[in-house]
Image: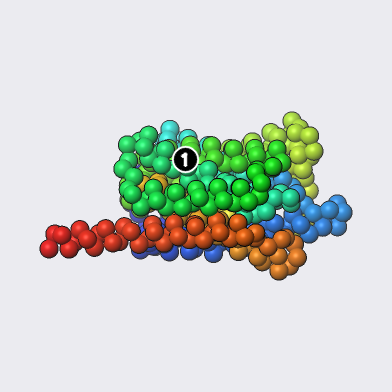
Amino acid sequence: MHATSTPNATHVTRGMSIELLSVLYLASYVPYATLTRWLSSIPYAPLGRPLTGLEVLPAVTILSGVLTYLFVWRSGWWREAHSGHLLGMRFPRPTRWTALSGLGAALLLFTVPLSFTFRDVSIPFMQLLMRGDVLIVAPLVDLLLGRHVRWYSWLALALVAAGLTLTIHARGGLHLPSLAMATIALYTFGYLVRLLAMTRVAKSGDARATRGYFVEEQLVAIPLALASLAMLAVFGWGPQGGQLGFGFIAIWTSGQLPCLLVLAGLLFLISIFAMLILLDRRENTFCVPFERSASVLAGLAATYLLAASRLSAPPSRAELAGAVLLIMAIALLSIAPRLAVARRKEANH
């Protein structure tokens, strides 16, 4: 993954702290979550009802995939990937580990948009469930692969787990639709696979390796996600199969293309920022709470925006309390490592 870098490729990742990346991730996620829920709440005249998440999902996945491949080509990131040759032409190719990560990323591509579309389940609650599960997975991956987990990472994890427990208890338990439960399970499994692969081969702090990893992962993730959705649409999945069929064919003439383009662009940005956060060379128990907490806070912000438009109820007190605990976790992860470095410097002097 270490071919010659290009100026454009280097410019994208140079000098960004994990805190800044988390802010950019948050700024992209708020409009993405808001617009996704808005599309599934506003009636679509020809159908007499709002579009479902499954009806929007194929087009957004296709468009974001096109944007991703255009970026990879124009930025030169493809040169950082492992390569093969065919008919005298060089092309990027995935390795065993990046292909495995691509499988996990494919699961995320269609579970994330779906998580915003369950009308009887609040966005913050789904965000806390999905992000909380991943935060439990993060230290397990570190321990399995022999990475040291520092005390402040464990404490931050405990804060996030407390927020998750508080919110579930206040809601009286899970009580989710079966499709929502399946979404959470597939999302958590996708992240488990992805974190295992990332930690095994790419959490080195090398920007070139990070860019190459992203390219190889997306070579697998985007086609696999689309192929899986297409198979469900063709071979049937009850009413969901028909909704996916609409999303592959009829959605393009629905008049929703501007919204879909915006969603695709935001999804592309989210994927870039998330990858840069997760591939930080520090342990997963440090990096994952940054990315997970930013997405939960984005879900809260989106809920307030939707509540102002009377398309959603405002966050509950328990959801707000969970968000406060997440903010505390972020502050701890940001400050504690710097204090530790300062103490080491003083000791050396």
Total residue callouts:
1
How far across and down, in percent of the image, does residue 18 sit?
40, 59
Residue 221 percent coordinates (x, y): 54, 41
Horizontal placement of 282 versus 250: left or right?
A: left
Mark 1, residue position: 137
Badge 1: few (under 14), some or many (20 or more) residues near its Cα, within 10 Å?
A: many
Residue 165 shows in the view: yes
Answer above or below: position of 183 versus 7. above
Q: Quadrant of the N terminus?
A: top left
Residue under the image location 33 percent in, 59 percent down:
336
- Viewed as shown, does residue 78 lie left or right of 336? right
Front-lying residue, 24 or 129:
129
Instruction: Where is residue 228? Give x, y as percent.
Output: 64, 36
> If the image is split into quadrants, where does the C terminus sit?
bottom left
Front position in the image: 7 or 30: 30
The answer to whether any part of residue 306 appears in the image is no
Relative to 347, is 222 on the left or the right? Answer: right
The residue that appears at 70% across and 56% down in the rendered structure is 37
Q: Residue 17 in the image: x percent, y percent?
A: 38, 61
Residue pushed farthest top?
235
- In this view, the residue farthest toward the left is 349
Considering depth in this image, is 273 or 186 the residue closer to the camera? 186
**Residue at the bottom extreme of this rendering:** 308
Q: How is the image coloured?
A: rainbow
The picture quadrant where one finds residue 109 is top right
Q: In the rendered structure, which amino acid carries the disc numbered 1?
A: Val
> Which of these two is toward me, 46 or 35?
35
286 left or right of 238 in image: left
Q: Residue at x 53, y 37 (%)?
A: 189
Residue sitting at 33 percent across and 49 percent down? Answer: 151
Secondary structure type for disc 1:
helix
